[in-house]
Amino acid sequence: MSKDIRIKRGLTLRLEGEAEKELIKAPRSKTYAIKPPDFHTVVPKMVVKEGAKLLAGDEIFYSKYTDQIRFTTPVSGVLKEIKRGDKRRILEVIIEADPENVYRDFGKMDAAKADAKDVKERILESGCGAFIYQRPYDIVADPADTPKAIFISAATTAPLAADKGFIIKDKIEAFQEGINALRKLTPGKVHLCVDDSSAEYLKNIQGVELHHVKGPHPAGNVGIQIHKIDPINRGERVWTVGVEDVAIIGNVFLTGEYRAERTIAVTGSEAENRKYFQAIIGANVADFIGEVSDSVRIISGDVLTGTQLSNGQHICFHDNEVTMIPEGDNYRLFGWLPFTYNNIHSNSRTSLSWLFPNKKYTPTTNLNGEERALVVTGEMEEVLPMDVYPMQLIKACMAGNIEKMENLGIYEVAPEDFALVEYVNTSKLEIQEVIRLGLDLMITEVG
Amino acid sequence: MEWIRQRLDKIKQPFQKGRKYEKFAPAINALDTFLFTPNHTTKKGAHIRDAVDLKRTMITVVLALVPALIFGMWNGGYQYYTQLGESFTFWDAIGHGALKIIPMIAVSYAVGLGIEFAFAIFRGHEVNEGYLVTGLLIPMIMPIDIPLWMVALSVVFAVLIGKEAFGGTGMNILNPALTARAFAFFAYPTYMSGNTVWVSNASEVDAVSGETILGKLAAGNEVGYSAMDMFNGVIPGSIAETSVICILAGALLLVLTKVGSWRIMLSAILGAAAMGLIFNALPSMGLEGNDLTNFPWYLHLVVGGLAFGIVFMATDPVSAAQTMKGKWIYGFLIGFFSIMIRVFNPAYPEGVMLAILLMNVFAPTIDHYVIEANVKRRKKRLEKANTQVETAV
């Protein structure tokens, strides 16, 4: 029996350019990349040099301060380049792929029967530790911790996001094996949250506490679900894993191979071939979208939380979608007049867009205003379905007041939960960044 | 449009970074963004943003003020011609009022925006839109005959002490427009109260009373206006405070656009009604009231500045309470104290001004206790979780 979670506050953005539910095999990219900046706070320590020959699943670097977390290559080939930025920070590890993947053999293992210690070791040596994130802080989980529970969100609510039910429907066996493995990592429960789409495929998964989530975005965010099911207190750890990542972990046990398959939905009003692609983690975005004009923004991830890419760069580690929307670097005459430019969506009623709830919008990247001090109140609470005072928490983060942040619930939030708050904010502040900096401060001060 | 844009870009050249007038960029940017929503794109975080911005929000409030302002102009003329006993047309009345009021608005904007621009340049931030509303509110809550230099001085006080001293828009504790009125009220009481300031040129006309209704009640005089007059607003008073109908039209716009908090408005009405009812009930408890306490509670709601105050001043998001529950408490107390001050202290018939300023000061305290409840909930949950862990061990 599943338990229902109903979310009332939030905002589902209807945007033009949804991907057609048709899965096609992506062409094999020439190069694949693992980007250490995708793993916040991880300081990479390389174990191989440029020119090394690698099998898929071979370790390429590990986390300097939590050395059990290892990162492995998703494809077999030759390590082509280690791209560095300022202060020699590693930005990208680029692997030139063989025409066909050759896997390193970890050996099969029945996760349900195996010893917990062996399961953990297998997950870490295959590089699957990179899929397991911890809350608070939304960073890669420290394997030395014991989480009170593990959460998996198979609900999709983010605008133009890849449908998680569609992603997982052919990988149910691997998903179940992944769950069997994850169960060994926590003395608590493994919670699986599904929506109408994914419920169809995941309703018979064993060994999980199933929750049916209903409501507008951010209901699909795992942070909101944790908050509703089993909120995090000071000192507690909760782990989260992506839906497709559970299947990758499962495959390590089923086949003994690190098959870093990633389904990528190409979406957005400016994308031409809007379909789902069967690809591999770290693929080159150019292979999905071809030539793109300069007036288009390419985003790895969704429009609210994604990372901007230039064509030819590699898709970020965790992202299931590539979104393309028009750049909005144009001026609008008297754009501040209320009730004008109603083709731009607004959650505020100073635009008439609220009269057309079913209309699909084509948003641009225009900021639609300028940054200002926080003036308007009450708008943030409307889109954050948490028992948290968002504006007060943001101000505490800005001020770096640790006690206040802790009191106001910093452990329960992640930047992505504040994406909608950032979207509706009249003062155009970069709120996800504020929350991230607040979390960083907590990591250094509290740990 | 292209042509204007190109001209603007050319004018802006010397204001760019590293150029001669770089420091004055906020001033030129304010003018530019008044014409065009800029071409800024998202750099970090969410790639798309809502169409709303602070300019839109503030202009919506300005729009909501327009009915009351126009009525104020007409009523200014109406009261003037009526006391003289002359016949007049609609346009005569509007014309007379406009002649008095538009210079006040011009002075208020010129002085206030001058200071705002200077501070923006000095501090190196963009000009905030907050003053668009404040600058219009200040003349609207003044008596029609107030000298322009007093308007200017009140504006200077409100913007410098009421706002910039705290760090500018968004940081002020008191509502700037009410700060301006309070300044004028206490610095120049003879121009701000009494029975000759509310109707234009009343001091030059003998034997005609231009008292406000509250003034009459406090003095024990007879009120010669019907309830309908009070609701329509054809009574003496501060420029835009008299017409409840026009204020309601503005309130409707604010509530529908969600720019103004309906919670504050509703709870303030409830608070005022509650206090009014208590006073009305005094005779039944064997206490003898006076004209003010016996004035029916529903009429208390429509006379004086109460309606204008709770719709346009109490809802100022910066100086009001910020939490949902806080807004209910804040609004209720404003209504409650407005009537209390009005009745207990006839020297200050404008109780709503003082009540809002008082609650502005207490709004952070109200919020503190509302948020403290949330913090306590979190701490309690932590305690519970800890005991569970301990028993498990």
Image: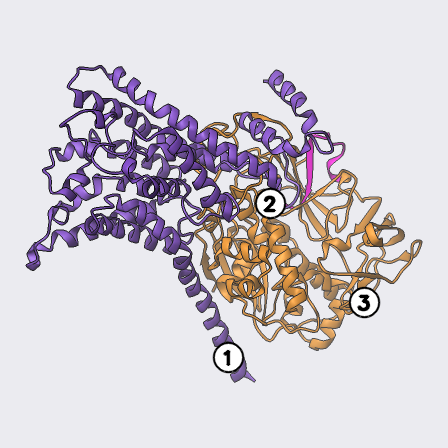
Chain colours: A orange, B purple
Q: Is residue A217 left or right of residue B191?
A: right
Tell me what residue is drawn at x 11 percent, y 39 percent: B221
Where is residue A109 drawn, in percent x and y? 74, 71
Question: Mark 2 vs mark 3: same chain?
Answer: yes
Question: Which span of residues is magenta-colored?
Answer: A288-304
Figure disc tally? 3
Element class at badge 2: loop
Q: Nearer the viewer, residue B371 or B12?
A: B12
Where is residue A37 drawn, in percent x and y? 75, 54
For the residues labelled 2 and 1, say whether their Cβ atoms are less than 8 Å apart: no
Where is residue A43 drawn, in percent x and y? 78, 61
Subunit of mark 1?
A: B
Q: Is residue B309 left or right of residue A207?
A: left
Q: Which residue is mark 1?
A: B388
Tell me what residue is drawn at x 42 percent, y 45 percent: B317
Q: Amino acid at mark 1?
A: Gln
Q: Is residue B79 above or below residue B170?
A: above
Q: Amino acid at mark 3?
A: Phe
Q: Is residue A296 magenta?
A: yes
Q: Which residue is mark 3?
A: A106
Q: Is residue B328 above or below residue A347?
A: below
Q: Nearer the viewer, residue B168 or A57?
A: B168
Q: Which residue is mark 2?
A: A304
